[in-house]
Image: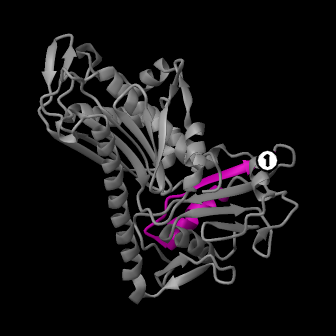
Amino acid sequence: MYFTKPVNKLTFQEVVHFLKQGVPENTLLDYKYMLPKDNEKFAKTIAAFANSMGGTVIIGVKDEHDKPKPPFTGIAFHGKIRGQIESIIQNYIDPIVFVDIATCKDPKSNNMFVVVNIPQSNLTPHLVGRLKRAYIRTGQASRPEVIVHPDKLPWLMDNRRKSQNLRHILLDKAEAHFNNFLRSAGKEPSSVQAVCGFTLMPLYPQTPIADYKALPSILQKLAFDCAGQTWPEQGTVNSVQDGIVLNPARSLSAWELNCYGLISQKTVLAGEDSYIDMPRFFKECVLFFKTASRFYEAIGYISPLLLRVKIANARGAKIKTPNGEKEIIEDYVRLDKNVQPLLLSGNMAQFSSEILEELSWSLNLPMSQEEGGLKTAHDILQSCKII
């Protein structure tokens, strides 16, 4: 949540730099000097984060009035703490919570900080201890976690349903923004062939996680060099409710970012002759994941994501292969997957390849390179000179 890179890449000094900012404990952040001797108490903290918005626990930090107290020297290094934390989660929380744990070691003093990132869970409620109690974060210093009474568990589930409704609203808005863009370009959406959309967003959006006014500058930071070409392509940036839309100058496509953590790219795959540019399709898929990974690192988001890949009006579109033409017979394809942000940054090539394979199969596209089909995502990333 608070670091702009995966926790397994954090250094000791980067944690110190964050602590010097004096961010107080809140619904998303907790400081502990040592791993508590009361295992159930620590499990309560982890479960409360998972049942709420997710969050971060930093171990090795003394606090005063809820703020980190210098000097920031950490605690003596010992290699078993990761196993201890995993054991506490497995023994005290049902269902278990999957967390990211990093030990950030100071090479000079041999001290360390331990950073535990807890994603917002899609398996709530997580119950703690023998009494099977559910907890949530409050943001209050005196009572950082409170018990959710059994009578109130439907409320916890209702929050999830509200998040799902918000998710549908955000997806529908992004769809409407692209349709309006097509109309402004003189294209009726229903008549445009093979419209592809890649969208990632929080699995359970609740509140804004980025300042909408900061999105233009975040968009600039997402840009990277792809074999001499800037990606995402430059174009016109317009503000919309809760976000911005980028329309690249040279194609019928659009990018959207919003303050709830949605990033979307939509593009028309087929030309006027109904042929799909396969290399471009594969390349844009892989580069979308690369861009999305940078977006979530920039806003410090670590909780589960929903990936939606949607291709509409595809039937009748064609591709050329060494063995002749192939025609798409499906009119509509949609893939929905739950994704962890760290998966995008940590194993992007494999993840992208799996998505490409599934899409190729669904669209009756050739699967092998001999047929003019799928390159591996690793090959695409190499050809773009970004790995």
Disc 1 element:
helix
Residue 91: x and y in percent read 52, 70
Say which quarter of the image contains residue 73: bottom right
The residue type indicated by label 1 comes to: Gln
**Magenta-drawn segment:** 81-106
Which residue: 73% across, 64% down?
23
Count of numbered labels shown in the rendering: 1
Mark 1 highlights which residue?
A: 13
Residue most toward the top?
322
Which quarter shows the C terminus?
top right
Residue 112: x and y in percent read 77, 53
Q: 54 or 298: which is nearer to us?
A: 298
State whether residue 213 appears in this view.
Answer: yes
State whether residue 387 appears in this view.
Answer: no
Which quarter shows the N terminus?
bottom right
Residue 187: x and y in percent read 24, 35
